[in-house]
Image (cartoon, rainbow, N blue to C red):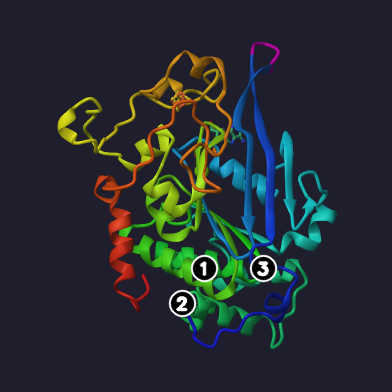
Amino acid sequence: MKEDLVLPAQRAQGPGTDGERLLEVTGLTKHFPVKGGFPIRRTIGQVQAVDGIDLTVHTGESFGLVGESGCGKSTTGRLITRLMEPTAGTVAYRGRDISHASRKQLAPIRSEIQMIFQDPYSSLNPRQTVGTIISGPMEINGINPQGGREKRVRELLEIVGLNPEHYNRFPHEFSGGQRQRIGVARALALEPKLIVADEPVSALDVSIQAQVVNLLQQVQNDLGIAFLFIAHDLAIVRHFSQRVAVMYLGKIIEVGDRDSIYTRPRHPYTHALLSAVPEVNLTDEDTGGRERIRLAGDVPSPISPPSGCRFRTRCWKAQDKCAAEEPPLVRISGNHEGHLTACHFPEEPTTEGREEDIVLDPALAALEEAASDEGQGQP
Ligand SMILES: Nc1ncnc2c1ncn2[C@@H]1O[C@H](COP(=O)(O)OP(=O)(O)O)[C@@H](O)[C@H]1O
Ligand code: SF4
Ligand SMILES: [Mg+2]
C-alpha cells in the first residue's frame, strides 16, 4: 500500500468514533419459500437460511462470521448490504433501520456499505476495462473526486497493489488474486465505512490467499474501514478479526473476542471447528484431554432443522433437554465479557495447550508465513 495514502477528511473527522455501533443487526431472519406440487405449485416449506441472529459491528472493527457451507453466511451478508430484504428482524446502520428502506431511501448510504464477493471471476464484467469497473460505482453515485475519476482509479489501483498503467486492461488479463484486488479497489472507490467481504479469498490459491488477506488487513487498518469478514473456517478470521461469531444452520451459536473464542471455546461446535482432524477419538484417554473431533454426519436441512438445539444431531454431548429447549445465546459462567454461547452443556473452558490442538487448513500456514515475511510481492 502506498505510504502517503491519506484518510478522506470526512472519515478522519467524521461522526464515527472508535467503538460507535456502526451496524446493529437484531433478530435478523430470512426464510426462502420452497415450492412444490403438481399441477399447481404452492409453498410447501421454508428454507430457514438465517433465523434470528443478532450482531454488532463497531466503527473500524473487523468482525468475523464463520460456519460451514450452507449455514446462512452469504444470506446474512446480502441482508446487511440490502441486496435482499429480511423476512423479519432489523438491520440498523448508524442507528437507522434500513431493513425495509426503499431504493431511494437507501441511496445516501449505498456508498457507505460495500461488498467484496467470493468469486473474482464472475464478479467482474469481462467486457469492461478495469478503469470502467472501478469508476462505475463513482459514476452511478455521481461522485467526482478531485482531479477526476481516472486519477482516482489509478490511485486505487496503486493502493491495492496493481499497476496504475493497467487501467485499460480487461479482467481476463489478470490472475485470480489480481482480480480480487480489482474487486477490492471497486469496493474502496466510494470510501465505504463498512465492507462485507463474503469469503473473499476462498476461490484463490492458498499462496495467494495470504497476500489478499494482508491487503484487506492493511486497508482495514489504514483506512479505518469496518469489515464483516465471512469465512467457512476459523483459520482466516483468526488472522483478521478482533471479534468472531460462529454460525450453525442459520443461528449464531457462539460469539466473542478472538482470543476468547480461540483459546476458551465453550460450544461443542466451535471445539469441533477448531480441532478438525481425521480421527474421532473422544473417549480415548491417551489423548490426554486434547480432543480431536471430527463431526459426524451432514448438516441437517435448513427446511426442517432439529428442534431445540440445531446442533444436537451431531453433538456428542446432546441430552433430552437439547431436543426440548433451544439454548439461549448468553454469557455462561467462566466466559469473558462479551463471549456468548448457546449451549445447555458447554465444554469446560480450555486454558492451556489449545494451540497445538488447533489443526487448521493450509491457508493459515500460508498466512502466518506471509505475516512473518512482510513486503511480499503481489500475486
Ligand atoms: N435465493 C435462495 N432461495 C432459496 N434458498 C436459498 C437461497 N439462497 C440461499 N438459500 C439457501 O439458504 C441456505 C443458506 O445459504 P447461504 O447463505 O448461501 O449459506 P453460506 O453462505 O453459509 O454457504 C442454504 O440452504 C441455501 O441453499
Ligand atoms: S445444547 Fe446440547 S446439543 Fe446443543 S451443543 Fe449444547 S450439548 Fe450439544
Ligand atoms: Mg456463502
Q: Is mark 1 within 8 Å of ligand 3?
A: no
Question: Camera-side residue: 319 or 368?
Answer: 319
Nearest to the observer: residue 358 or residue 233 = 358
Mark 1, secondary structure of its residue? helix
- Decide: marks 1, 2 in contact (CB < 8 A)? yes
Residue bearing the label numbered 2: 162
- Could you tell me if the residues under marks 3 and 2 are in contact, i.e. CB atoms within 8 Å? no
Residue 54, relative to residue 300: is it above or below? Answer: below
Ligand 1 rendered quadrant:
top right
Which residue in the protein does label 1 denote? 182
**Residue 3 position in % (x across, y down):** 49, 86
Which residue is identified by label 3? 136
Question: Which label's residue is closer to the chain start, 1 or 3?
Answer: 3
Determine if the magenta segment contains residue 39: yes
Quadrant placement of the C terminus: bottom left
Amino acid carrying mark 3 in the image: Gly
Q: How crowded is mark 3: few (under 14 residues within 10 Å), some or many (20 or more)?
A: some
The span from disc 1 to disc 3 (Cα, nearest Å) is 12 Å
